[in-house]
Amino acid sequence: MSKILIVAEHQGGKLNAATAKCVHCASQISGAEIHIAVFASDPAAVAADAARLAGVSKVITVANPQHANPMAACIAPQLAELAQGYSHVFGPSTTFGKDLMPRVAALLDAPQASDIMAVESATRFRRPIYAGNAIITVEVTPGTQLVATVRTASFDAAQTSTSAAAIEGASPSATLPQHTRFVSVSAARSDRPDLQTAKKVVSGGRALASADNFKILYQLADRMGAAVGASRAAVDAGYAPNDMQVGQTGKIIAPELYMAFGISGAIQHLTGIKDARTIVAINKDPEAPIFEVADYGLVGDLFHVVPELEKLIASNG
Ligand SMILES: Cc1cc2nc3c(=O)[nH]c(=O)nc-3n(C[C@H](O)[C@H](O)[C@H](O)COP(=O)(O)OP(=O)(O)OC[C@H]3O[C@@H](n4cnc5c(N)ncnc54)[C@H](O)[C@@H]3O)c2cc1C
C-alpha cells in the first residue's frame, strides 16, 4: 500500500491552498495513506487546518524556532528523516516546494518526478515537458521511494472534512545546517487578490508600453476584483514587477477567467495559463497565436478596449 508524506506549505499561521491540492493529487493513488508534515515555530493552527483535509489520516508537527521562517536547507534534513518508511514524499510545485523537494530527493537518494499533473497509478504519473508543449508519462520502478512536486494548477483543493485526523509531534534528530540562516524577507504587498489563487486575472504584455500605462489594467482589475499578471516581455521592460510574471519562468496559474491584453501568446506564456478555465484575448493582430487558445477573442486596440470594458462594468454595477 502507498504511504504518502506531504510537506505543508503555510504562511502567517495559515495553511496554503497548495497543500490541499497536493492532498487531492495523493488521494488519486488508490488506497493511499496520507500524512502531512508541518514544520513551524508554532505549528498548532496550521496542523489543525491540515488535519481537517479530507483523506488525511495523520498530521506530524515539527516545532522548532528555526522554522519560524521556513528555509529549504533547514527543513530538508528533517523531512528526509521523517520520510523513512513512506513510499512517496510530495510537495507543491511552488517556489517553496521547488526549493525543498530536490534537496529531500538528494538526501534520500531517491528519484524525483517534477510537476505532476495527473496520476495514473502509484508508480505512473504525467507531467509537462518542453514548456508544456508535450506531456510525458513517467514511471518509477515499483518499490522505489519517490519524491515529487505537484503542479497545483492541475488539481482542485481537497475538501475539508468534519472529522479531524490525529496530530502528533515529532522531534527529528537530523542536525540543521549552520551555513544557511534567515536574514530577512522582502515580499510585495498588494490589496489585490493573490495572483496564484485568484479566480480572475487581468494580464498585460509588451503592448502596454510603459509602467504608467499598466495603471489602466490595475483599474480594470480593481473593478472586477481580479489579480494582475504580466508577460515576461512586460516584466523585462520594467512595465510590471517580477512577481507578476505569468508563464514558464513565472507563475503557473489556473483562474476561472484569464484576460490577456496585448500578449502575443508565446508558448512560454501559454504554459502558465494552460489550466485557466476561460481565456479572453484582446490583441490588435488577428494572427496573434493567443487566439488559437482563447475561448473568446477580440481584435482591437487595448487602449480603446480597456476603457470601454471598464465603462460597461461600471454601468452594470
Ligand atoms: C526560456 C524562456 C522562458 C520564458 N518564460 C516566459 C514566461 O514565463 N512568461 C512569458 O510571458 N514569457 C516568457 N518567455 C518569453 C516569451 O517567449 C515571449 O517573448 C513573451 O511572452 C512575449 O511577451 P508579449 O506577448 O508581451 O510580447 P510580444 O510577443 O511582443 O507581443 C505583444 C503583442 O501585443 C500586441 N499589440 C501591440 N499593440 C497592441 C495594442 N495597442 N492593443 C492590442 N494588442 C497590441 C501585438 O500584436 C503582439 O501580439 C520566455 C522565453 C524563454 C526563451
Image (cartoon, rainbow, N blue to C red):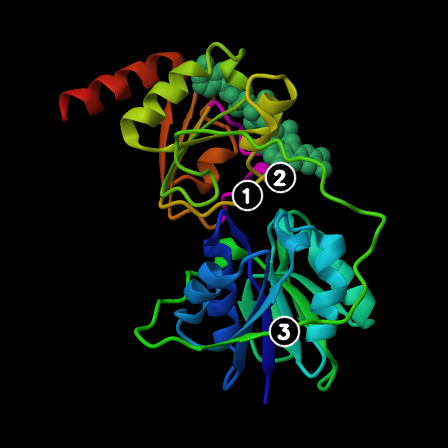
Compared to residue 136, the image places residue 302 above or below, namely above
Part of the protein shown in magenta:
262-274
Quadrant assignment, res 112: bottom right
Q: Are marks 2 and 1 in contact (CB under 8 Å)?
A: yes
**Amino acid type indicated by mark 3:** Ala
Is the residue marked 2 within 8 Å of ligand 1, measured from its CB? yes
Neighbourhood count class around disc 2 (C-alpha, 10 Å): few under 14, some 14–19, many 20 upward: some
| Residue in the picture at 38% in, 48% down | 277
Mark 1 or mark 3: name the one nearer the start of the chain. Answer: 3
Q: Residue 270: within the magenta?
A: yes
Give the farthest residue toward the bottom: 1
Which numbered circle lies on residue 170? 3
Mark 3 packing: few (<14 Cα in 10 Å), some, or many (20+)?
A: some
Secondary structure found at label 1: loop
Separation of residues labelled 1 and 3 (CA atoms): 37 Å
Which amino acid is tagged 1?
Gly
In the image, is 172 to the left or to the right of 154? right
Circle on res. 272: 1
Q: Quadrant of the C terminus?
A: top left
- The residue tagged 2 is 268
Percent x, y of residue 217: 40, 21
